[in-house]
């Protein structure tokens, strides 16, 4: 237990119309040489230096009712002049980022991720924290409540409901304080039990959705995940904080909650029992962030023990912590009985298709992608498909390949995750960089060094077709059927592409988004950012571009007229043959009894 005096924080909705919070931090005994304060530059779970300090408008300090000089000493640090405490530093913070990472405030809703607001006094990171949230008084704030899993001081057990009134909250240290996001406003909510504890699903504002169905489906998914790790949730309660918007998507995990952004059309409507792709997408997002309760929040890379939020934390393991989580997110929907097997195979096939269409997979390994997350994944550009690969999507496929490889040896990825939990997660020990490969070999009873060398540290495609055959799943590959064909479904011969341009474009203005390296467009001198205005002398349309690939022939020469940075250019492109890069997975009807048993063990369905 810390012997430091508690830090006192207060967050006030200063000006909702201007989107400004007022955030105060009080230190009882400031450093005699002048107390320094630091703000995080990134938030755990989102690996990019986000420079939260750029949203700080003004910072002032006072002690004993008198102003104290305070100066900024670097991008994320301030130092107050020597004074006799208590010392209070107050900041005005702009909050208008509709994301799960920072903060948002208007007359209808308030949200913050603590890392974006809470300065930490040097030397006091281990001090207990007290957070005061006074009720807002602006017009329209009547009836507002607070949703968070921070402990309440007005509850005897300290836990209390996830949604309740304004007041005072506590956290054992600064790290915990910033790991419990807070939402304020009016909520549409429901509760359910899973893993032996209460879970709350809270939507900001009025949301027209089937809450009983959501609670029922999420309870099954959460129970399935808890069962994997021993049956009990690793927290006293859990909160799904969800902001539903016309367009948007995102999620960020926390130790006993998650912040989600979902589209309104992803939520199930009362009276509509269908299982559309949109609803599956929302359930997959919720499942993903919930799985992080173990894999990232408690089973962590050693590089994150502890987090240093002032600089990048490098690890080559994000393919496992994010990619394996991405593998399990939809798999858990099947095991929970929410998603049919055929629909799950369609999702996996789409992931395989995405990776197969990414030339960068042959140039960057998932281990390298993990290390370079800070400079590449969150800063994608027109060349990203040529030079990089997603440690989420390809990482999930490597996770699938590892699971099926372990099953060949009588083990499974389930066993690997359970071992990681017992050896590292539960005792709070960071996972060393080489531990996952070593543990996989231990469970297999044979060296899997070659697997990790080729598919994790190397850029080879894992042999998924052969591995899936072991569990009675057939893998077919076909040509695409237009720019909207994501794979996963059987083809229609009348729509199959014959030729390939080797580029993608925006249908709205025919601007080329990506030009694939060594493809027809690249060889013909087209570049990302070019706007196509004519094809063979005729006005360019999205339909003509589609027809070019569907009806054109390999070797056909096509004249393009285009604008490049306001210059009119002419280029000639010789079309390639369309590649077979679209995956379809189906349950094999002629699978052996052993394959059927293996598939049941894998999917639990």
Image (tube, rainbow, N blue to C red):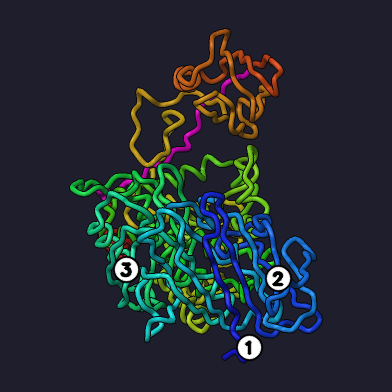
Dot 1 falls on a residue whose secondary structure is loop
Do the residues bearing badges 2 and 1 touch, measured as CB atoms within 8 Å?
A: no
Is residue 465 shown in magenta?
Answer: no
Label 1, label 3: how far apart the Cα atoms are: 41 Å
Per the model, the C-alpha gap separating discs 2 and 3 is 50 Å
Q: Position of residue 337 (x, y in %)?
A: 25, 60
The image position of residue 429, as x and y in percent, is: 56, 81
Q: Would you call the spot at circle 2 few (<14 residues within 10 Å), some (14-19), or many (20 or more)?
A: many
Assign a secondary structure to mark 2: strand
Please give the residue where the numbered disc 1 appears in the rendered image: 4
Q: Position of residue 310 (x, y in %)?
A: 69, 67
Q: Which residue is mark 3?
A: 224
Residue 457's x, y, as percent? 62, 59
Magenta stretch contains residue 588: yes
In the image, residue 345 sits, relative to residue 154, either above or below, namely above
The residue singled out by tag 2 in the image is 61
Against 163, residue 478 (above or below) is above
Q: Examine the rendering and report whether any part of residue 347 can be seen.
A: yes
Q: For the residue labelled by badge 3, is the local secondary structure a helix, a strand or a loop?
A: helix
């Amino acid at each position: 237990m810390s012997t430091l005096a508690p830090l006192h924080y207060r967050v006030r909705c200063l000006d909702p119309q201007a989107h400004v919070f007022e955030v105060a931090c009080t230190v009882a005994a400031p450093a005699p040489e002048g107390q320094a304060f630091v703000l995080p530059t990134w938030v755990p779970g989102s690996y990019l230096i986000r420079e939260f300090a750029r949203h700080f408008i003004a910072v002032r300090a006072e002690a004993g009712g008198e102003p104290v000089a305070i100066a900024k000493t670097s991008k994320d640090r301030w130092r107050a002049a020597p004074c006799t405490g208590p010392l209070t530093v107050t900041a005005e913070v702009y909050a208008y980022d509709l994301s799960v990472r920072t903060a948002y405030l208007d007359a209808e809703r308030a949200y913050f991720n603590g890392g974006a607001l809470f300065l930490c006094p040097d030397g006091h990171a281990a001090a207990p924290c007290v957070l005061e949230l006074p009720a807002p008084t602006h017009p329209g704030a009547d009836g507002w409540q607070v949703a968070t899993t921070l402990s309440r001081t007005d509850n005897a057990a300290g836990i209390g409901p996830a949604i309740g009134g304004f007041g005072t909250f506590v956290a054992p240290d600064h790290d915990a304080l910033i790991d419990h996001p807070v939402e304020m406003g009016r909520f549409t909510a429901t509760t359910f039990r899973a893993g032996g504890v209460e879970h709350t699903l809270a939507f900001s504002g009025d949301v027209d959705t089937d809450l009983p169905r959501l609670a029922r489906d999420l309870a099954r998914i959460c129970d399935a995940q808890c069962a994997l790790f021993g049956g009990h949730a690793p927290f006293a309660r859990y909160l799904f904080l969800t902001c539903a918007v016309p367009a948007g998507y995102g999620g960020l995990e926390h130790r006993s909650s998650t912040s989600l952004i979902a589209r309104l059309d992803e939520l199930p409507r009362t009276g509509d029992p269908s299982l559309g792709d949109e609803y599956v997408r929302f359930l997959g997002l919720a499942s993903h962030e919930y799985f992080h309760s173990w894999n990232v929040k408690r089973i962590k890379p050693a590089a994150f023990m502890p987090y240093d939020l002032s600089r990048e934390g490098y690890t080559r393991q994000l393919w496992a912590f994010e990619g394996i989580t991405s593998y399990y997110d939809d798999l858990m929907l099947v095991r929970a009985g929410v998603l049919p097997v055929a629909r799950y195979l369609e999702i996996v096939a789409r992931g395989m298709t995405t990776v197969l269409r990414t030339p960068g997979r042959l140039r960057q390994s998932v281990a390298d992608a993990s290390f370079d997350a800070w400079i590449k994944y969150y800063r994608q550009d027109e060349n990203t498909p040529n030079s990089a690969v997603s440690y989420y999507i390809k990482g999930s496929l490597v996770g699938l390949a590892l699971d099926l490889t372990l099953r060949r040896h009588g083990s499974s990825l389930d066993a690997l995750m359970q071992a990681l939990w017992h050896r590292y997660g539960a005792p709070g020990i960071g996972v060393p960089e080489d531990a996952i490969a070593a543990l996989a070999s231990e469970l297999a009873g044979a060296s899997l060094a070659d697997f990790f060398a080729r598919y994790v540290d190397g850029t080879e495609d894992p042999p998924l077709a052969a591995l899936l055959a072991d569990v009675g799943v057939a893998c077919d590959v076909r040509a695409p059927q237009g720019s909207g064909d994501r794979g996963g479904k059987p083809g229609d011969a009348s729509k199959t592409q014959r030729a390939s341009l080797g580029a993608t474009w925006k249908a709205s203005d025919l601007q080329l988004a990506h030009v694939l390296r060594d493809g027809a467009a690249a060889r013909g001198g087209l570049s990302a950012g070019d706007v196509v205005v004519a094809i063979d002398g005729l006005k360019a349309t999205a339909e003509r571009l589609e027809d070019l690939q569907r009806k054109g022939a390999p070797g056909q020469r096509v004249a393009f007229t285009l604008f490049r940075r306001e210059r009119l250019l002419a280029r000639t492109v010789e079309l390639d043959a369309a590649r077979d890069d679209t995956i379809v997975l189906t349950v094999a009807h002629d699978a052996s009894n052993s394959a059927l048993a293996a598939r049941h063990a894998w999917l639990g369905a």
